[in-house]
Amino acid sequence: MGYVDMGGWIGGQAEYVMVPYADFNLLKFPDKAQAMDKIRDLTCLSDILPTGFHGAVTAKVGVGSTVYVAGAGPVGLAAAASARILGAAAVLIGDMNTERLAHAKNVGFEPIDLTMARSPGRAGRGGPRHSGGRLRDRLRRLRGQGASSGRQSRRSAGCGSEQPDGDHPGSRCDRHSRPVRDRRPGAKEQAAKSGNLSLRLGLGWAKSHSLHTGQTPVLKYNRQLMQAILWNKLPIAEIVNVKVINLEEAPEGYNYFDAGVAAKFVIDPHGQLSKAA
């Protein structure tokens, strides 16, 4: 609940809540004592964990995959945790929030600081480079492809003829296929100022990129994720750093979250989680 267009139900953060279609969308835990022991983890089944898992599944993460997650917030961490349980060999998380990056490292992921301007892989070639270069070099190392780019050829719609890596049409196409950089008001691109992202569909076609959108089918995943939690395979509360607060503390929790704190706040109106602890 809380989605902007769900028939008038505008949220679920209250002392008592009417749950529409509860016979369909509630998840029954097999054992109450076991569930209460894992209740901080199980709260994540309502939203962020299935969302992150859906992203990893949609991206076809599997055994031996190298995965990059853009953003080290709770959903990004849930996606990283999902990639790991699906068998990824290496999981990188990029962000500009140093606190969140430090937490991501503490729970076993490879942090990528997107504020860094130089690429270690291009040291000595003279000039500052954006964090997309650092990310590409790290990915190449992890995938056994080396850190330097060498000579690369590019051919795609609207990009001109094949050219070596450098200041040529081919390399301009390459730049458009780099990991997405920060898009926000004040950015140089006009589209970014209005919250839009420019995409070159011809280049995406040439490189066989995929773009997926849509709301997460939570019921498709929540039972299997519940079992992973109950059988100690997915310590999601530790990974997203769940902090339990009461209902009166919710506004303060929102302020902390808006400021980028490395935590996920769970509201406990009746003190049930503290009793379980």
Image (tube, rainbow, N blue to C red):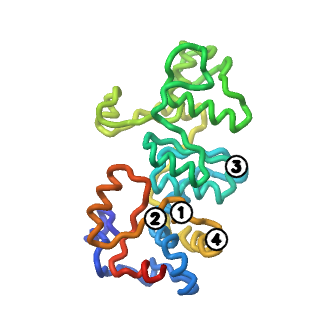
Q: CA distance from mark 1 to mark 2?
A: 7 Å
Say whether residue 234 is left or right of residue 146. Answer: left
Label 3 Cα neighbours within 10 Å, binned few <14 / some 14-19 / many ≥20: some
Quarter residue 144 falls in: top right
Which label sits in the foreground, 1 or 4?
Answer: 1
Label 4 Cα neighbours within 10 Å, binned few <14 / some 14-19 / many ≥20: few
N-terminal of the two: label 3 or label 1?
Answer: 3
Q: For the residue marked with disc 1, what is the amino acid? A: Glu
Q: For the residue marked with disc 4, what is the amino acid? A: Asn
Q: CA distance from mark 2 to mark 4?
A: 16 Å
Task: Determine the residue positioned at 60% across, 33% down.
Answer: 207
Which label sits in the foreground, 3 or 2?
Answer: 2
Say whether residue 19 is left or right of residue 81. Answer: left
Q: Is residue 256 above or below residue 217?
A: above
Which label sits in the foreground, 4 or 3?
Answer: 4
Q: Secondary structure at mark 2?
A: strand
Q: Is residue 15 above or below residue 80?
A: below
N-terminal of the two: label 2 or label 4?
Answer: 4
Q: Which mark is residue 238?
A: 1
Does the residue at mark 2 contact the one at mark 4 (Cβ under 8 Å)? no
Q: CA distance from mark 3 to mark 1?
A: 20 Å
Q: CA distance from mark 3 to mark 2?
A: 25 Å
Q: Which mark is residue 242?
A: 2
Residue holding disc 4: 232
N-terminal of the two: label 3 or label 2?
Answer: 3
Q: Which mark is residue 89?
A: 3
Q: For the residue marked with disc 2, what is the amino acid? A: Val
Does the residue at mark 3 contact the one at mark 1 (Cβ under 8 Å)? no
Q: Secondary structure at mark 3?
A: loop
Q: Secondary structure at mark 1?
A: helix
Quarter residue 152 falls in: top right
